[in-house]
Image (cartoon, rainbow, N blue to C red):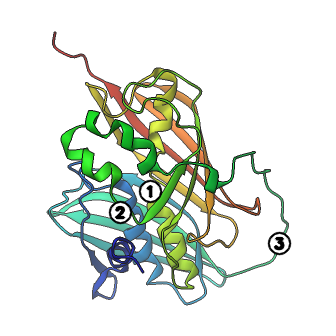
Amino acid sequence: MSKVLDELRQLLALERIEENLFRGPSQDLGWGTVYGGQVLGQALSAATQTVPEGRLVHSFHAYFLRPGDVSRPVLYEVDRIRDGSSFNTRRVVAVQKGEAIFNLAASFQRDEEGFDHQDLMPDAPPPEAVPTEQERLAPFAQRLPRFLRSRAVAERPFEMRPVDESDDPILPSPKAAMRRVWLRTIDRLPDDPAFHRAMLAYASDFSFLTTALLPHGVTWLTPGMQVASLDHVMWFHRPFRVDEWLLHVIDSPSASGARGLVRGRVFNQKGQLVASTAQEGLIRQRAQNP
C-alpha cells in the first residue's frame, strides 16, 4: 500500500480511549482548518466500532458546527442510542478544546433482501480517458496561491478524474451547476465493507459544495469568498469497493440566502447506484475594499 494511502488508513483507524471514546489525528491539507471529509470518515469509523459485526451503515446525517484545528487531535464521543433486532443507531460528537465542532447521527442495518430499483447512470467517458486532477491543475500551478502549489500536483490517496473541468480553475466562466468525477484509491484496500464506506465518506466532500459556485463564475479562491460546509448526508444503497472506479455525479438545484445546496449520486462502473449524497453550505461573497 502506498505511503499516502496508508496514512489515510491510519487516520480513519482511530485510537480507542474508553468504551465509547475515540481519538483521531488531524490532517493538514493546507486549507488552515480540518477538511470536512476527515471528521466525516473518523466519526463514522468511531460509530462503526461500537456496533455488532455484520451491521453496516446505511445512512448518516451530520452537521459541521465549528472549524477544526489542524494542530490538534479530535475526540469522538459515541452515544449508543439504540440497539434493535435489525437496526442500530449511534450519535457521535467530535470535540476539540472542550467544544463540539461536529456531530453525526448514523443508522446501521443487518443485511436484508427487498425490492430493488434505481436511477440510470448518466453517460460518462471511461476514467482512463479523463486527465487526473493533478494533470488538469499542472498548467495552472504557478497561478495558484503559494500554499496550494505543491499540494495541487502532489500524490494523493485518491485518484480523482473530473470529467467536466476543462475551464480555467482560477478564473472560470459561468456554466451549469453539475459535475462528474471518477474516483478510486490509488492502491488496493482490505476486504472490509465498513472501511470502504468510511473511505467513501472521506472522499465525498471533495469537489462537492463548490459545484454550487459553477453558475456564478467564482471559486473558493475568488477574493472575498467564504465557503464552508454546514451539513452532510449520505445514504448507502449497495455494496461497493472504493478501490474500484466510482462516478460521483453532482448537481446543485439551488443557491439562495448565502447558502448553496448540492446533491450527488455515486455509481460503480457496472452502472449500479451505490450511494447518494447531499450537502448545504455557506457560500458568501464579501465586498472587497477598493
Residue under the point 20% across and 49% down: 32
Question: Which of the two discs, 3 and 2, labels the residue nearer the N terminus?
Answer: 2
Amino acid type shown at disc 1? Ala
State which mark lies toward you, 3 or 2: 2
| Residue at image mark 1 | 62
Question: For the residue labelled by badge 2, is the local secondary structure a helix, a strand or a loop?
Answer: helix
| Residue at image mark 3 | 114
Residue 31 seen anywhere in this rendered image of the structure: yes
Residue under the point 44% across and 56% down: 62
Amino acid type shown at disc 2? Val
In the rendered image, the residue lying farthest to the top is: 290
Question: Which of the two discs, 1 and 2, labels the residue nearer the N terminus?
Answer: 2
What crowding class fits label 1: few (fewer than 14 Cα within 10 Å), some (14-19), or many (20 or more)?
Answer: many
For the N terminus, the image quarter is: bottom left
Q: Give yes or no for contact between labels 1 and 2 (Cβ–Cβ under 8 Å).
A: yes
How many numbered circles are shown?
3
x, y percentage for residue 177? 57, 31
